[in-house]
Image (tube, rainbow, N blue to C red):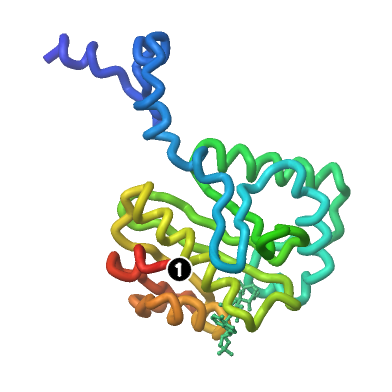
Amino acid sequence: MAAQRAEIAPSRGRLRIPRVACVRGDMEAFSTRRWWLDATEIRTQRLVLRAISPADAGALGHAMWAHRDHLSPWVDVPGIPLSVRSWRERVRRMTVAFVRGAQLLYTVHGAPTSEGLLGCSGLTPSGATCELSYWLVPASTGRGYAREAAAALARLACRRAGARAARIRCRADNPRSAAVARALGAQLTSERGGVQEWTLPLERLCAGY
Ligand SMILES: CC(C)(COP(=O)(O)OP(=O)(O)OC[C@H]1O[C@@H](n2cnc3c(N)ncnc32)[C@H](O)[C@@H]1OP(=O)(O)O)[C@@H](O)C(=O)NCCC(=O)NCCS
């Protein structure tokens, strides 16, 4: 028993890749674990989703502040204007979260040029049930872009992360967000403390764009 304990070192929540595997260059195992690094650009019929990167700091900071009245009731938007430096720091943390696979945030652009920021969509690949999120700048609403972006991330979660379901959380007084969840094929599975939880079952998860 004591010998067994010695062999299985505590991981302290970190991914443990045997040192020998890295030294011998077992990159197949490595890339399987880090599939999201092969998914930094996703193209759908009308959109290009790009993994968040430090280069997005200016556009993201501008969009979130310019459209704070539209976003702030539902999305975490700073209550005061932040400096370019602060946005860079925030976006740097988001980029680190992407590289670690903790939260995959994508900026959403129009195809094929991928100019301009239409909004953001996120995927948190936490085990069998992943989580989806989205927001758009006001001029990009009413065209199905949120649905198209979230559907692409749902399919990614199903095909690459092995997700069996997706969850969308939104406030009960946010009918636009609930409509996106419904349009994706999600069902309302709980409502507590003014927060709705919508669940996208496996058969709808892979049915995306
Ligand atoms: C939530 C939010 C992303 C929804 O935006 P949206 O434009 O309503 O959602 P979609 O992009 O999926 O567009 C759906 C609408 O486009 C229409 N549409 C037009 N062309 C379409 C197409 N080709 N495909 C699908 N829908 C299309 C749909 O009919 C639908 O409108 P309707 O519900 O009036 O019928 C947006 O309101 C937002 O950014 N809100 C603030 C942030 C927020 O609340 N985020 C969610 C936090 S939980």
Q: Nearer the viewer, residue 102 or 172?
A: 102
Give the image location of residue 130, x and y in percent. 40, 56
Dot 1: element: strand
Identify which amino acid the numbered label 1 is placed on. Ile
Q: Please identify the quadrant where the N terminus is shown.
A: top left
Q: Residue at x 30, y 18 (%)?
A: 9
Q: From the viewer's perspective, is 86 left or right of 74?
A: right
Which image quadrant shows ligand 1?
A: bottom right
Furthest-front residue in view?
Answer: 112
- In this view, which residue lies farthest toward the left? 1
Q: Nearer the viewer, residue 44 or 73?
A: 44
Packing grade of label 1 (10 A; few <14, some 14-19, many >=20) is: many
Q: Is mark 1 within 8 Å of ligand 1?
A: yes
Quickly name the residue at label 1: 168
Judge whether 151 appears above or below 84 on screen. Answer: below
Residue at point 50%, 40% (across, down)? 38
Place residue 69 in its image quadrant: bottom right
Percent across and percent down for residue 193 are 46, 76
170 shown above or below 54:
below
> Image quadrant of residue 28?
top left
Eyeballing the image, is 89 above or below 61? above
For residue 78, side relative to residue 22 (left or right): right
**Rendering coords of residue 166 (x, y %):** 38, 63
Q: What residue sits 65% from the left and 61% below the top?
A: 108
Q: Is residue 184 above or below residue 65?
A: below
Q: Residue at x 61, y 37 (%)?
A: 96
